[in-house]
Image (cartoon, grey):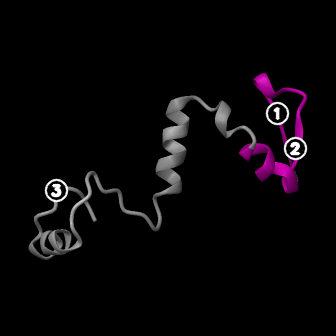
Amino acid sequence: MRYVGILEETGKCIDESDAYEYAKSHLDEMPQEDKNLFVDFFFSGNWVKEHEMRSRKQRNYEIAEGLRDEPI
């Protein structure tokens, strides 16, 4: 399988085995909105976004009491 470019990518053909490296090499060229979406996707699995650092004891208390203002 391969990817064949259209529109501004017309004339480019990327083999599936090279697709990851090709895409990775273009990350810095993405518009900021796409970069933000990529970061959100990348950290969507095994990560929790914290808005400020708190002590572990305080964080555990808030979780136990249901007081956190952001999802865990």
**Which is more foreground, mark 1 or mark 2?**
2
Q: CA separation, marks 2 and 3? A: 45 Å
Q: Earlier in the sequence, mark 2 or mark 3?
A: 2
* Image spot of residue 55 (x, y percent): 21, 67
* Residue type, label 1: Gly
Can you identify the residue that label 1 sits on?
A: 5
Q: Which residue is mark 3?
A: 69
Label 3 SS: loop
Q: Residue at x 16, y 62 (%)?
A: 68
Q: Amino acid at mark 3?
A: Asp
Q: Are marks 1 and 2 in contact (CB under 8 Å)?
A: yes
Q: Residue at x 72, y 37 (%)?
A: 26
Q: Nearer the viewer, residue 7 or 53?
A: 53
Q: Is residue 19 left or right of residue 35?
A: right
Location of residue 30 by image quarter: top right
Q: Are marks 2 and 3 in contact (CB under 8 Å)?
A: no
- What percent of the width, then of the height, locates residue 47? 42, 64
The disc, 1 or 2, on the residue closer to the chain's N-terminal end is: 1
